[in-house]
Image (cartoon, rainbow, N blue to C red):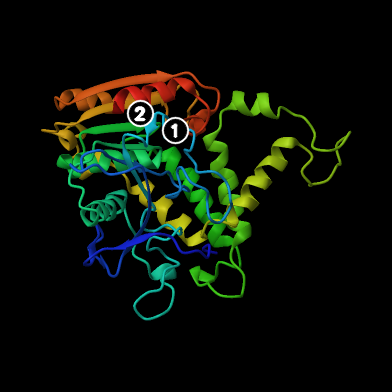
Amino acid sequence: MAPDFRPQTLALPGPLQLDSGQALEHVEIAYETYGELNDRRDNAILVCHALTGDQYLASEHPVTGKPGWWERMVGPGKSIDTARFHVICANVIGSCLGSTGPASIAPDGAPYAMRFPVITVRDMVRGLVGLLDGLRIQRLHAVVGGSMGGMQALSLAANWPERAGRVLVIASTSRHSAQNIAFHELGRQAIMADPNWRGGDYYGDQGAPDAGLAVARMAAHITYLSEDGLTEKFGRRLQDREAKSFGFEADFQVESYLRYQGSGFTRRFDANSYLYITRAMDYFDLAEEHGGRLADAFAGSSARFCLVSFDSDWLYPTAESRHLVHALNAAGAEASFVELSAPFGHDSFLLDVPALDRVVAGFIE
């Protein structure tokens, strides 16, 4: 079920035209800002969030009470220094943390549910560009994103090249692979198989498809980790017991961990939003959007690019970043690339990797 809270929002002045050909009316974008915008309005950095992220990158989450998801990176004196930069983070359309999504009220007074139009990453960025227009920020000092946030950063650079001077893409890709799509489909089917999903019309007091959403989160969370990381953290150690139970409770620590991740997720996220956002990621293919040649997506771009990958990330492995760098080079764009060593898998961009801090600080300087 969508969380109940009142975020800071900006209403777009007109309908948002979507890649599907539909138009979304009365769109609101929820966002947070950190640091002051200077008089020239040229010190803004847009940070784009990942699949299950939100706008609370450096402030307490209003639902969970947990610190912001990138608080270690964003703040006074940190790698993205809010004493120097005005940092913006917005919840994407289709999500459930305040921006218009499936749980939002449609013009007829009922929640959209599955009447919400299917969206793309480029549609998400259209919403972000609308937010920037509303905030009267024409050109960003930088756009930064990890995972799905990196897709948004790339889409902004490809489709609105005049809007950002620097583009930092971390642990991301130019298109979703068949394996990525397969994992997402597993999660979507888990949600839709939950009897409480009811074709997406579960808003109210009848119960949400929490069991299906929890399984979807558990399956996805495995892809964010590395085998070495799981082995080091959990191995085959038992959870609060001396011997196997010979039953189907959480005998192993790793089982208990995944169940905790799944149940906690249902308290802050909407199942329909999970369906829509994963579908948007699966549709993402920058080369396809630009005539089939990835380099053409960045033709004539004047931005500086930096691509970062992690050696333990098997969800978006280093080869994906190298492919992007080759396309940027072919387009004549200024691009740098670094592969960092970290044991945490795809989630490394969210965790304590000091080398990433240095790369981020150096690039946006």
Q: Looking at the picture, how far across and down is residue 323, in whole percent? A: 29, 26
Image point (39%, 24%), residue name: 318
Looking at the image, residue 246 sits to the left or right of residue 344; the answer is right
Q: Where 15 sits versus 108, above or below? A: above
Q: Is residue 215 left or right of residue 256?
A: left
Q: Which mark is residue 320?
A: 2
Question: Taking the image as drawn, is residue 14 in sight?
Answer: yes
10 Å crowding of disc 1: few (<14), some (14-19), many (20+): many
User: Would you say 306 lies left or right of 224 here?
Assistant: left
How would you rate the neighbour count of disc 2 (Cα within 10 Å): few for under 14, some for 14-19, many for 20 or more? some
- Which callout, 2 or 1, points at the residue further toward the start of the chain? 1
Q: Give residue 169's mark.
A: none
* Viewer-side residue, 365 vs 51: 365
Viewer-nearest residue: 121 or 72 = 72
> From what the image shows, is residue 257 above or below residue 329?
below
Quadrant (top left/top right/bottom left/bottom right) for the N terminus: bottom right
- Residue situated furthest left in the rendering: 300
Q: Residue at x 60, y 23 (%)?
A: 228
Mark 1 lies on residue? 73
Residue 248: where, in percent of width, then height?
Answer: 79, 47
Mark 2 belongs to which amino acid? Answer: Glu
Residue type, numbered disc 1: Met
The residue drawn where x is 58% and y is 52% is: 64
In the displayed structure image, the side of residue 244 where residue 208 appears, left or right: left
Residue furthest out toward the bottom: 108
Q: Position of residue 15 (x, y in %)?
A: 23, 67
Quarter of the figure that contains the C terminus: top left
